[in-house]
Image: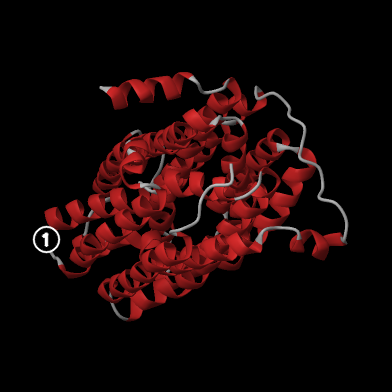
Amino acid sequence: MNHFREYCDGVRAFSRDASLFILGGVFNGLGMSVFGLLFNLYLQSSGVSESRIGTILAAGSLGAAVAAIPAALLLERVGTRKVVIWSTLLAGVFYALLVVTRSVPALRALSFAGVLCITFYRIASSPFLMSNSQGRERIYLFSVGSASGMLSSLAGFLLGGFLPSLILRAGLASGTAEAQRAALLYSVAASLLSLFPFLRICPQEPEGPRPGGGFLGRLRSYDWRIIWRLMVPKILVGLGAGLVIPFMNLYFSNEFGLSSGRIGVFFALMQVGLFLGMLGAPVLTRRFGMVNSIVLTELASVPFMLVLALTRNLALAVAAFVLRGTLMNMNIPISANFEMELVKREDRPFTNAVSMISWNGSWTVSAAIGGAVIEEHSFALSFYLTIFFYLLSAGSYYLLLGRRRPVS
């Protein structure tokens, strides 16, 4: 009961702008989860091979890596509100073009551009929540923000899984690929609804450009003693995740012959686990501390990854899929909060950008080869490689950051 009362007090302390930002994230998550569930399946239905799908996904990750530093510098100059509005609008345009384009080189370019734009919004997220909260409610804000995103993704996966069949039954499409394309366009429209709460956020004064020394001087002004320690674990976990996570819908489709509707249900079940896990993040943090919580949840996900590599039983695979996702992702609000508290206020956008570069850069490399590994060998090999990188990531996080304390 004490934890529940503390949770309620923390939620009641959320500022208006922070609540609007979270609401915008709900719409964004709804649309992007439908898109993420169906896009690979749509490409496959359109005759695109797994290896080419991997290169398209890798182009998107490359866009995120390229956008991160410019996004941080732009936030210093123009502020969060303008960045999230324009990045959301432009991302919607590029994602819509992704759906109606057939050429694989054009798909790579549009994937790069779409993820590049949405990265501007994602870079703004953690610094914005940090600036619009106080110490007592901060972990609750990060937790609820992540959990609400999971809840919207749950709705998106359920909707996305059955939307193509509903479109077919309504006679609005003549085949599977055409129905998936229509569903993808609906998902883009849903994500653009996030513009309404974003437009109601009060304009805030930007941090302003950092003084002196040009671009290189500004780079030297950041606290690289902390930043490089944050980069190493993110690179390792990104290398592992990129090998399998973008292809989990194909895993259920190829290994078990499932339809998009059933796959959507399994993804929705995982979102339930993620939602509950992220809501429990503050309790976990109070019990074990931030770093220990991150390391323990990452290590606990490894046995379930091994189950996915070995089993041919659908029920066991689904259980492992849900539990792995819950454990691996419940530390997202904890690590986001911890990273922002490790650095000074003026360093937060840049630190968040470097963290995202580390993740997306390594994800780009592994996603680019992940499809080829699956196509030429098996899903099992990709799972084994992912386990190896996850173990390295957990160990490096504890060794490099275990004794670090927040500065704010």
**Amino acid on which disc 1 is placed:** Asn
Q: Is residue 41 left or right of residue 317?
A: right
The x, y position of residue 397, in whole percent, is 43, 63
Whether residue 231 is visible here, answered yes or no, is: yes
Q: Is residue 119 left or right of residue 38?
A: right
The x, y position of residue 181, in whole percent, is 46, 47
Front in this rendered view, residue 310 or 161: 310
Residue 286, quarter of the rendered image: top left
Q: How is the image coloured?
A: secondary structure
Residue at point 53% right, 40% down? Answer: 188
Q: Secondary structure at mark 1?
A: loop
Seen as rendered, the residue at the extreme bottom is 376
Front in this rendered view, residue 392 or 74: 392
Whether residue 163 is visible here, answered yes or no, is: no
Front in this rendered view, residue 269 or 393: 393
Front in this rendered view, residue 111 or 268: 268
The x, y position of residue 284, in whole percent, is 32, 42
Q: Dot 1, crowdedness within 10 Å: few (<14), some or many (≥20)?
A: few
Q: Which residue is mark 1?
A: 313
Residue 217, quarter of the rendered image: bottom right
Residue at point 42% right, 55% down? Answer: 42
The C terminus lies in which quarter of the figure?
top right
